[in-house]
Image (spheres, grey):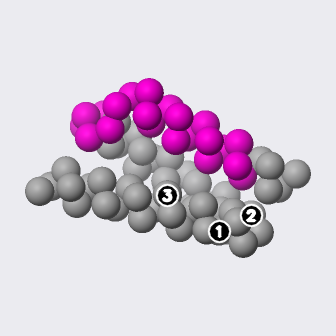
Amino acid sequence: ARNRGMRTRLRRALKSLRTAIDQGKTDEARSVLNGTVSLIDKMSAKGIIHDNTAARYKSRLAKRLAGAAG
């Protein structure tokens, strides 16, 4: 049950960050990115998500933000 709640928390963070990027709020997205990356790392460390999955999430988010900013 705890893992399910943490996974939900991660999904919500990812969705809010993707929404901010899609709406062009790059300043807001940059500030949210740090917290989201931290959350991804915590999930990976606890074994809730796989290490490669965590790396993939972080890479795609950074790439998406850079594309929106540029």
Image x and y of residue 70, in percent = 88, 51
User: Quick check: is 62 in the magenta stretch?
Assistant: yes
Q: Position of residue 67 (x, y in %)?
A: 80, 49
Q: How many marks?
A: 3
The earlier-in-sequence mark between 1 and 3 is 3
Residue found at x 38% / y 56%: 10
Distance of label 3 from label 2 (alpha carbons): 15 Å
- In the rendered structure, find residue 20 and report the number of the disc placed on it: 1
- Viewer-closest of 22 and 62: 22
- The residue beneath circle 3 is 14
What amino acid type should be assigned to the residue bearing mark 2? Thr
Which residue lies at the image location 31% right of the left edge and 34% below the top edge?
Answer: 45
**Quarter assignment of residue 54:** top left
Q: Is residue 17 left or right of residue 68?
A: left
In-image side of 10 versus 23 (left or right): left
Mark 2, residue position: 26
Query: Amino acid under label 1?
Result: Ala
Mark 3 crowd level (few <14, some 14–19, many ≥20, 10 Å Cα): many
Q: Nearer the viewer, mark 3 or mark 2?
A: 3
Residue in the picture at 43% in, 34% down: 53
Is any part of residue 25 visible from this angle?
no
Looking at the image, the residue that sits furthest to the right is: 70
Question: Along the polypeptide, which appears first: circle 3 or circle 2?
Answer: 3
* Proximity of marks 3 and 2: CB atoms separated by less than 8 Å: no
